[in-house]
Image: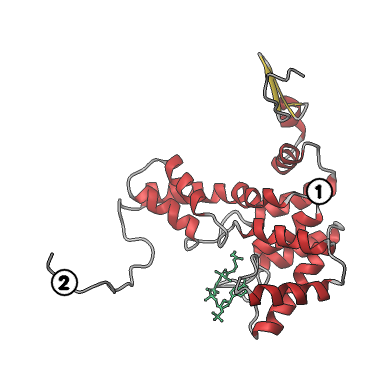
Amino acid sequence: MDNNKWQTAITDIEPGKIRVRGYDITDMMDNLSFAQTVYLILRGELPDDKEARMMEAILVSSIDHGASPPSVLGTRTVMSGGNSLNASVAGGVLVIGDSHGGAIEQSARIMQAWAEKEGTPQELAKSLVAEMRASKKRMPGFGHRLHKTDPRTLKLFEIAEKLEFSGRHTELAIAIEAELEKASGRKLPINVDGAIAAVISDMGFDWRLGKGFFIISRVPGLIAHAYEEMTTEKPMRTLGNTDFEYSGPPERKI
Ligand SMILES: CC(C)(COP(=O)(O)OP(=O)(O)OC[C@H]1O[C@@H](n2cnc3c(N)ncnc32)[C@H](O)[C@@H]1OP(=O)(O)O)[C@@H](O)C(=O)NCCC(=O)NCCS
């Protein structure tokens, strides 16, 4: 190793050769699915069959959720303003944050920190929810504007159970959902971000990769929305909520 050079352990290239994490790209093209390849590049090692199947389900789960999510509005608004496909998709990706899609990161961070503590999932959930409520914070990965029960969560948990990935983080997520309902009197279902956070935590992923899972899954959806906006809608059409009123000072003189 030459200490004057910076190091990368991801991909090695030379004329006529590309090796990702040591595997020849042409061999990968012959033998790996996209989900297996994503797992390899993020983790550095090939997944086993169960890890590959779980990864597949995670990446499929968030590909799109209709025309209303903020990232889709971001993509369509940038396109509607007269920009390129790449600018529109980048605009949508920039909208992904702690409240939308990116909740995976903070949800996984919290679950990983709390799952290490002593106590049953129910005991931990009780203390965690009390702490969040005392500091007036929302629990990332819980609540949904549309779904009372998020169908993607049920399916991800069902697959995780079958593949034996359902561990302490998933148990904690389920206990948090119950505790939130007990404490607030309203059902705040584990949304897809919370479910992915629990499952990737049970798979041993670092929480700092959390937003990456959503971005990888959602970008094809954003490309479809950018392309549809480009080919079927007129420029600068009205998008988003325009039901607002002015609340600033009345007309005045300088
Ligand atoms: C997703 C979300 C924005 C949907 O919100 P919504 O259904 O429009 O609900 P509101 O923002 O109007 O909140 C309604 C009430 O539920 C509470 N609430 C909503 N989500 C909550 C959460 N995750 N933790 C604790 N309380 C929550 C709000 O504080 C509010 O309480 P109040 O009426 O006492 O002030 C919201 O649940 C949230 O912020 N979740 C956390 C972020 C997240 O997981 N995002 C990923 C979405 S897929």
Q: Say what amino acid the circle numbered 1 marks.
A: Glu
- Mark yes or no: residue 27 visible: yes
- The x and y percentages for residue 71 are 49, 55
Q: Say what amino acid the circle numbered 2 marks.
A: Glu
Q: Which residue is mark 1?
A: 51
| Relative to 118, 229 lies left or right | left
User: Quick one: SS at disc 1?
Assistant: helix
Q: Quadrant of residue 151?
A: bottom right
**How many numbered marks appear?**
2
Tag shown at residue 233 = none
User: Is residue 186 shown above or below 24?
Assistant: below
For label 2, count other residues whose C-alpha is less than 10 Å away and answer few (under 14), some (14-19) or many (20+): few
User: Quick one: SS at disc 2?
Assistant: loop
| Relative to 178, 240 lies left or right | left
Q: Quadrant of residue 167?
A: bottom right
Q: In this view, which residue lies farthest toward the bottom?
A: 185
Tag shown at residue 251 = 2
For label 1, count other residues whose C-alpha is less than 10 Å away and answer few (under 14), some (14-19) or many (20+): some
Q: CA distance from mark 1 to mark 2?
A: 63 Å
Question: Depth check: 11 or 63 in front?
Answer: 11
Q: Residue at x 53, y 54 (%)?
A: 96
Q: In this view, which residue lies farthest toward the front?
A: 254
Question: Depth check: 203 or 68 in front?
Answer: 203
User: Is residue 23 shown above or below 57?
Assistant: above
**Quarter of the image that includes the C terminus:** bottom left
Cβ atoms at labels 1 and 2 below 8 Å apart: no
Which quarter holds ligand 1? bottom right
From the image, state whether disc 1 or disc 2 is nearer to you: 2
Q: Quadrant of residue 109?
A: bottom right
Q: Residue at x 68, y 61 (%)?
A: 107
Mark toward the start of the polypeptide (1 vs 2): 1
- The x and y percentages for residue 27 are 76, 27
